[in-house]
């Protein structure tokens, strides 16, 4: 094999990598967001003489390499004209709104409205709103009001999660996803989000989340029962629904003037 005897009989000496392991673990604890090369360069700046190949071997043995998050490719979304449903409980829209308390802790509000009369069906407020919580809220609304034919939403991770997709199939409710970066395709709930932010989130400084929930409930009662909406002929959502149990054919709304039409 044309191999020298020294190579054949060579036995590598055992290497003590404990010092390298300790140094790498310290760097991982101090800078968990940094990868191998940042850690290696920091060690070189500290005067460590170790070769990068040896350090990388120990780095991999310790299981320290950062995990890369694979991007999920969204399926193609179809642009559809925004239509006013012809009956109550036909189409719901839902979205999230984010704000902070006085101590800068972030919280979220999950808003669900009926597109027919712009009624606020539910506003769930909490620090964390996972897909499981979204399904719980939707189940609550379905038990209370019955099933809608469709629900319109954006492509948020809570809405595209597997559990929500399974729920829509079980309930036989169609999920209508808007195109990414096109909030005007979900204009009804976007307009509602603005009203909710002006009426509650931007109006008060909240010390704890219970204050947000309490004021949200007060605002919802006024919004649904008393607040006049220009798009509903100056009527509140509840009064409009009582007086218009059967509407005309769906009204198609153009994106370039939806703010004027939906000014409720």
Image (cartoon, rainbow, N blue to C red):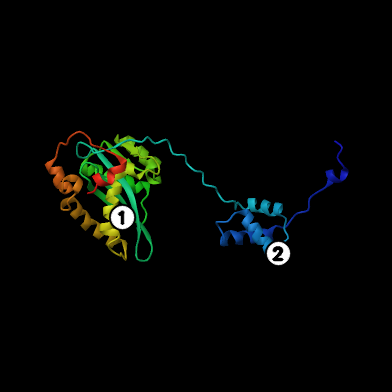
> Which element type, helix, strand or loop, lies under badge 2?
loop
* Kind of element beneath mark 1: strand
Residue 17 versus residue 204: which sits nearer the camera?
Answer: 204
Disc marking residue 47: 2
Within 10 Å of disc 2 (Cα), the crowding (few <14, some 14-19, many 20+) is few
Tell me, yes or no, if residue 226 can be seen here. yes
Quarter location, residue 33: bottom right
Quadrant of the image for the N terminus? Answer: top right
Residue located at (39% from left, 36% from top): 77
Q: Residue furthest left?
A: 243
Q: Give the CA separation, mark 2 to mark 1.
A: 52 Å
Tell me the number on the disc at residue 52: none
**Lower position in the chain sequence, tag 2 or tag 1:** 2
Residue 94 falls left or right of residue 3: left
As drawn, 249 above or below 232:
above
Q: What x and y, as percent, mark residue 253?
A: 27, 39
Q: Is residue 62 above or below residue 46?
A: above
Report the label total: 2
Residue 229 shown left or right of residue 188 in the figure: left
Q: Residues at badges 2 and 1 in contact (C-beta under 8 Å)? A: no
- Which residue is at 78% across, 50% downward? 12
Residue at 33%, 37% (x, y): give it: 176
- Residue under circle 1? 125
Q: Is residue 249 above or below residue 71?
A: above
Q: Is residue 130 left or right of residue 7?
A: left
| Residue 188 appears anywhere in the view | no
Q: Quadrant of residue 116?
A: top left
Provide residue 217's location: percent of width, then percent of height.
23, 56
């Amino acid at each position: 094999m044309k191999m020298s005897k020294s190579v054949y009989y060579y036995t590598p000496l055992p290497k003590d990598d404990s010092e390298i392991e300790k140094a790498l673990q310290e760097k991982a604890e101090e800078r968990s967001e940094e990868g191998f090369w940042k850690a290696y360069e920091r060690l070189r700046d500290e005067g460590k003489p170790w070769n990068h190949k040896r350090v990388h071997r120990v780095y991999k043995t310790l299981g320290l390499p950062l995990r890369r998050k694979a991007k999920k490719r969204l399926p193609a979304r179809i642009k559809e004209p925004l239509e006013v449903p012809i009956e109550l409980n036909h189409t719901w829209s839902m979205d999230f709104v984010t704000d902070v308390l006085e101590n800068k802790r972030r919280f979220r509000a999950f808003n669900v409205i009926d597109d027919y009369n712009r009624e606020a069906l539910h506003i769930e407020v909490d620090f964390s709103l996972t897909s499981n919580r979204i399904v719980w809220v939707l189940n609550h609304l379905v038990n209370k009001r019955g099933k809608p034919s469709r629900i319109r939403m954006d492509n948020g991770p809570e809405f595209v999660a597997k559990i929500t997709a399974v729920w829509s199939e079980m309930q036989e409710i169609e999920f209508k996803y808007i195109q990414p970066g096109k909030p005007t395709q979900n204009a009804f709930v976007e307009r509602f989000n603005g009203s909710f932010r002006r009426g509650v989130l931007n109006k008060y400084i909240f010390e704890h989340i219970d204050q947000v929930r309490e004021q949200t409930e007060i605002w919802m009662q006024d919004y649904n029962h008393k607040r006049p909406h220009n798009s509903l002929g100056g009527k509140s959502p509840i009064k409009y629904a009582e007086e218009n149990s059967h509407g005309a054919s769906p009204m198609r709304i153009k994106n370039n003037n939806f703010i004027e039409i939906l000014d409720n």
